[in-house]
Amino acid sequence: MLDFLAENNLCGQAILRIVSCGNAIIAELLRLSEFIPAVFRLKDRADQQKYGDIIFDFSYFKGPELWESKLDAKPELQDLDEEFRENNIEIVTRFYLAFQSVHKYIVDLNRYLDDLNEGVYIQQTLETVLLNEDGKQLLCEALYLYGVMLLVIDQKIEGEVRERMLVSYYRYSAARSSADSNMDDICKLLRSTGYSSQPGAKRPSNYPESYFQRVPINESFISMVIGRLRSDDIYNQVSAYPLPEHRSTALANQAAMLYVILYFEPSILHTHQAKMREIVDKYFPDNWVISIYMGITVNLVDAWEPYKAAKTALNNTLDLSNVREQASRYATVSERVHAQVQQFLKEGYLREEMVLDNIPKLLNCLRDCNVAIRWLMLHTADSACDPNNKRLRQIKDQILTDSRYNPRILFQLLLDTAQFEFILKEMFKQMLSEKQTKWEHYKKEGSERMTELADVFSGVKPLTRVEKNENLQAWFREISKQILSLNYDDSTAAGRKTVQLIQALEEVQEFHQLESNLQVCQFLADTRKFLHQMIRTINIKEEVLITMQIVGDLSFAWQLIDSFTSIMQESIRVNPSMVTKLRATFLKLASALDLPLLRINQANSPDLLSVSQYYSGELVSYVRKVLQIIPESMFTSLLKIIKLQTHDIIEVPTRLDKDKLRDYAQLGPRYEVAKLTHAISIFTEGILMMKTTLVGIIKIQDWQSMYQSTHIPIPKFTPVDESVTFIGRLCREILRITDPKMTCHIDQLNTWYDMKTHQEVTSSRLFSEIQTTLGTFGLNGLDRLLCFMIVKELQNFLSMFQKIILRDRTVQDTLKTLMNAVSPLKSIVANSNKIYFSAIAKTQKIWTAYLEAIMKVGQMQILRQQIANELNYSCRFDSKHLAAALENLNKALLADIEAHYQDPSLPYPKEDNTLLYEITAYLEAAGIHNPLNKIYITTKRLPYFPIVNFLFLIAQLPKLQYNKNLGMVCRKPTDPVDWPPLVLGLLTLLKQFHSRYTEQFLALIGQFICSTVEQCTSQKIPEIPADVVGALLFLEDYVRYTKLPRRVAEAHVPNFIFDEFRTVL
């Protein structure tokens, strides 16, 4: 019959793909559960007040129009909603896809069952699949994994959070409207159950069975799966655990599956006493805390409390005498096997001959160790005992007392067992790889010995006192041939024949009185030894390794192991050699990855890499968390050595009197230094051993992570401002010393001067120093941070504009009057001074906040320009080929894009093409960009925006004066305005809006210049007013910074005014 998992068996491949997908979904749910945005929990009052009106649970679906109309009525809520959407749409979509895949999983499983019933798979029915060993396993796993998914979702992602995420996805995503969207079904499946994973939380009634029944599943399928799990050993694990007292451990995985699947048929838990009694007697006679998937633990005492039949059946197991008996038994077993393991681990004890002669004994010891560790870790775990449940507390206290539980002793047993297991596995792997070579070598040696003996009895070879004996000669030649004829591939026959040959060699020595000749005896003894070695070697089987792998499973401790972290770290601190044993423990823990990856691998699923990376990453994070104690301990020891050598140990002079030798010897401090140095060398040795430990699919190397670890975080210092990191503090310090209120930036010199003392504060050399100290990445990081700060500042500016301008009736009336007075913009404004300065006077109160925002943005733009210059300079100097390649690629791309806009038939990068995004990162790192051309934020239409900016500018001009050497400078230090930040801030602000706003703004400045000049001419004032000089300088600087042609300014101001103004200057 066709193999069920063969690639051409459609029935087997279909269910294998479903199960593979199930394991991948659980990994994705576990991964995502660590990235739930805190805002969806609405835990604290601040979040509730800020986001309560835009984050909805399923009550939203009762009247979505009502909720949306409330949002539309408040512009500030709309802005918040839009910002929230931009910040969270990516993660919300990822959660939605995970939820959707859970629903798709059960739909696919139901469709597969329907296909089986309808005869889609030829010669296959539900019954025949359950008779097949692989089919039986996969069908049981398929239902079990669905149950695990539902439990994981409810444990890790609270019901309210799920609802809020689903509603947010529904509101923000365009995909919801597509025809194949099954949003309703997903919402029905994953609506809140009322369950809370918080300790002491009350369990909802009919939970989790009502949750499990939200999507109906074929009842006969559930019943048949439960039947198989009750009666069969579906994974044939009992063969790896021959002792009857180990049976519940052998069937532990199956017990976990049965526990989950029973919730699909809760009537068994409630009323079927005989069935529950049978299940408990088989699976839970001596245990009641189980691991259901990758270390998620469940205490049956609590879980089965609401179910009458299950609770009654479990009472025998939980009888006080049974609890005492189990606890005492495991205490005795762990003491006994720990002594054995420590004996095995003594240097030189585990030799090849000893291992080969004692395989059953060693395996039994391993079984006892692992079973004892499993029982004690699970039944003493804090996570499995709700402190608010009196009965659970009593049972746990009883176990702790009777098992004489000591976490340090249990941890030591785990360490020693892992080390013992690791050594055995490595020995077996080596012996298996050398098995045939060694067997052939022993065969050749044995045969040659027999040929030599045959030659001795031929009388040809002179050997002292050996008479010629043709019978013995022929017999030994025959034995030599027999040894040579042994066939490696037929190990059973070869083993039998080898035993017979050994007996024959013993008999020949006895019957022919060969004992008298020591040399002949030696030859016979050597040959018997080689034949014994052949038997030992042929008995090295891969089954032993498989048994060790099954017995050594530590997946139940995937989460529990964390409770031993402090003990691990303390052990390392006290005894550095512990690191080598820890390596074996981590590798033992890594074997837990086989459980979720087995089916994914069998199905050749593309999910293999992502699932492997998730679990491996989790394990690597844990390993790093434990081992961060090593550098800490090493540096503590080094500090002690430095103190001893600096303060305690006196330097020995070149000449020394004999009677002072004792004083200079200082044996105590020198012994302490030697001890500390030895401890450091042991740490180093341990780290070198761990240097390339493969944990899952991730190699741990040198304990240096590419990214900052959550377990070994960047040290946090007392905050001096709102910064969290070093770069943040550096950035804010630079902003503080170049503050436009305190300093004046001279553009020609690229230098900041103090406004009051006129002393230099800093210059562009600062960025060369930062480049030298922090490197390109540090400087680029500073630039990126400034970029984000500008974004935040501009967003704050827009909200301020809404508040102080668009909601102030007086300001709006003033702006409206001014707009009427200056229309059309090409005309000359009569009585201009009066009109402009009247408008400025009426809006005076708004300019302080406005000026601060504009200057901050301008200040940060100057810093970004300086950084870009420094990056570009160092790139051209240190990597001229990279700089040239980037510049050429940039020009070529821009040329292609411009060509496309002139002729749309020409190519243009598609939306999913990341080229432009990726090249931008390179260009910014090489300083090949202009910060002033960047669009930092998306904006909407703002009424009065150009005229407000124009008014702002002419309101600031009286505070400035022109200096021939320095340009525009502040008139009074008490009313500080710095010209470059002002110009660049306004320029950046205008760049964020449509270009017509800039056009209007420039036209207003042109009109102001022309109208003022016209008024001066009519009043016969010979000099150009200072405000007009300032406005003209602004236009000149605007053209210079934007690199636009001069005609942009000349479109609004006649040529002769510019020429006249330059001669006056």
Image (tube, rainbow, N blue to C red):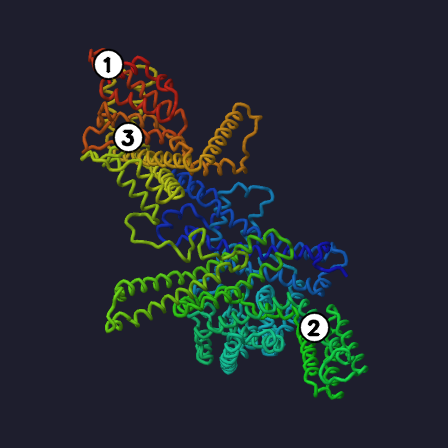
Name which of mark 3 and mark 2 comes first in the sequence: 2
Name which of mark 3 and mark 1 comes first in the sequence: 3
Q: What element carries label 3?
A: helix
Q: Which mark is residue 749?
A: 3
Q: Residue 703 carries which label?
A: none
Pointer 3 with pointer 1, Cβ within 8 A: no
Vertical comparison of 892 with 210: above or below: above
Q: How far apart are marks 1 and 2 (CA)?
A: 121 Å
Q: Position of residue 707 (x, y in %)?
A: 44, 51
Q: Which amino acid does label 1 sit on?
A: Gln
Observer able to see residue 154: yes
Q: Position of residue 772 (x, y in %)?
A: 35, 42
Q: Which amino acid does label 2 sit on?
A: Glu
Q: Where is residue 861 in the image (x, y as percent from the top left)?
A: 34, 34
Per the image, the residue denoted by label 2 is: 445
Residue drawn at the location 34% of the way across and 62% of the way down: 638
Name which of mark 1 and mark 2 comes first in the sequence: 2
Within the image, what quadrant is residue 129 found in? bottom right
Vertical comparison of 108 with 763: above or below: below
Q: Which mark is residue 1015?
A: 1
As drawn, is 898 to the left or to the right of 733?
A: right
Q: Which of marks 3 and 2 is in front?
A: 2
Q: Distance between the residues labelled 3 and 1?
A: 37 Å
> Which quadrant would the N terminus be assigned to in this image?
bottom right
Observer able to see residue 208: no
Taking depth in this image into account, of 392 and 1005 the one nearest to the observer is 1005
Classed neighbour count for the residue bearing mark 1: other residues with Cα under 10 Å, few (<14), some (14–19), many (≥20): some
Taking depth in this image into account, of 866 and 121 the one nearest to the observer is 866
Taking depth in this image into account, of 477 and 1006 the one nearest to the observer is 477
Q: Which amino acid does label 3 sit on?
A: Leu
Classed neighbour count for the residue bearing mark 2: other residues with Cα under 10 Å, few (<14), some (14–19), many (≥20): some
Q: Which of marks 1 and 2 is in front?
A: 2
